[in-house]
Amino acid sequence: MDKQKNLGRGVLSNVFANGILQFLNYAFPVLTLPFLGSAIGLEEFGVVNFFSVLVGYFTLFVIYGFDASATRKVPELEDDFKKMNLFFVEIQSSKVLLLILAFIVFSLLILIIPEGIDNYKVALATFGVTAGWALMPNWFVQGIRRMSDLVWINIIPKAIFLGLVFLTIKSKEDSYLYPLFISLSIVICALLSIIYLKFRLNISPRIRFNKSVLIRIWQERLVFFSSFVNNFNQTIGIIFLGFFVTYSEVGVFSLGWRMMNIIQVLVSIPILQALYPVLGSQLRSDLKSGTKVLNESIPLILVFIFSCSSFLWGTSPWLIQFFFGEEFMESVGIYRWLSIIPLISVFNHLMGSSFLLNLGYDKEVLRVTIWVSILAVSLNLFLIWNYGLNGAIISIIITELILFLFYNAVIKKLGFNFWRFSAWKLKVPQLKKNDGA
């Protein structure tokens, strides 16, 4: 009973801490967006957001799905410090190696992207985010359920650099300072987190490139492709817009998209990430009860998302008019169309990551996401070419709906009874720990 209570407290603490950390990571851009838009103008705003999305792919590359695969492994190693420490070194070394490869590819991309050379300062400053997440040990701290320990480590650097944004950015020539300050805040938070692990838990911060690192990268490739493609489906529209429309139109679309993404980042992701390792243990030890707990979590998540989305839906015209100005008002309609995405994405995440990945069906998840991503590329190319911003909106919605249908089909084909509607009651799910895990 004491173990169950401690686990429950650990999960709730992780949910709360994840919410704060996600807020800090996302609040920096959100709180400064109105100021940034007025200081650098709509076109430069589009440039900054374009490279932000592009660098996001490289960030996913260096994270490599370890936030899922490595996090679920950590609890199994907690009773053997030596193995856990070696595992930490192996994962961090893998991420640094991937960072080196990412920087080489990104440098080449700048040469072929429209106006890439002209915006090299913004591009390189934004890439610092990837470096920060390559060093960030959140995956490990999440696994040992001590995310609350990192809250203050993140608050102070982000607050300092948030202030610098308002003090230093005066015109469009200063636009590169915005991603630079975001990058520096993440890098410093990562370094402070590593120092914390070293002196508080005696975890080694060494980087070591050897055969085991290459093997680890190869073994986790399926989880990486799945996580990468899931993000790809929602963001590829912004990349295509950068090639087919003006950066001003990219700016309008990206603001609406960012407002939609606020709900995912601040509400959905913290809860889903905190539940992930616990749901995994329960599903693997008792599939029936684990599926029931998973379904018990759905109503509470949906209520949070719907409430936040409804508030933002109603206030979005005033918020955009007041903070950004008339030239951004088209973003209101874009956000309102996209506001359905967080609700659909929750189901897709629960079916794909929380259920199938936790049960080891990595290949099945990968097949689904690859087919859906091919469809997403085709839809975006056709619809953006013909309908511009409206085409990008339609593509995102259709892609998420098709992903939902594909996951349902795969789960039924595997013979699982995923949906337990009798468990859909508005209450906190009963989490239990498998002592043999």
Image: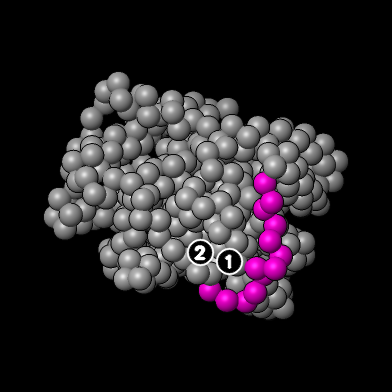
Q: Quadrant of residue 330?
A: bottom right
Query: Can you identify the residue that label 2 sits on?
Result: 271
Along the line of sight, which residue is nearer the eye, 203 or 418? 418
Which residue corresponds to the image point at 41% horizontal and 47% vertical from the top-left?
A: 72
Task: Give the prevailing secondary structure in the magenta stretch.
Answer: loop
Which residue corresponds to the image point at 26% horizontal and 55% vertical from the top-left?
A: 193
Which residue corresponds to the image point at 67% horizontal and 53% vertical from the top-left?
A: 418
Local crowd at mark 2 within 10 Å, few (<14), some, or many (≥20)?
many
Along the line of sight, which residue is nearer the eye, 298 or 177? 298
Which residue corresponds to the image point at 21% horizontal and 53% vertical from the top-left?
A: 197
Q: How is the image coloured?
A: one colour
User: Which portion, as a residue range, is magenta?
Assistant: 416-428
Residue 26 place in picture, x, y as percent: 48, 62
Query: Can you identify the residue that label 1 sits on?
Result: 297
Residue sitting at the far top: 211
Asked if residue 368 shows in the view, the reply is yes
Q: Nearer the viewer, mark 2 or mark 1?
A: 1
Residue 153 place in picture, x, y as percent: 27, 63
Q: CA distance from mark 2 to mark 1?
A: 9 Å
Callout 1 secondary element: helix
Asked if residue 174 shows in the view, the reply is no
Q: Amino acid at mark 2?
A: Ile
CB contact under 8 Å: marks 2 and 1: yes
Relative to 108, residue 303 above or below: below
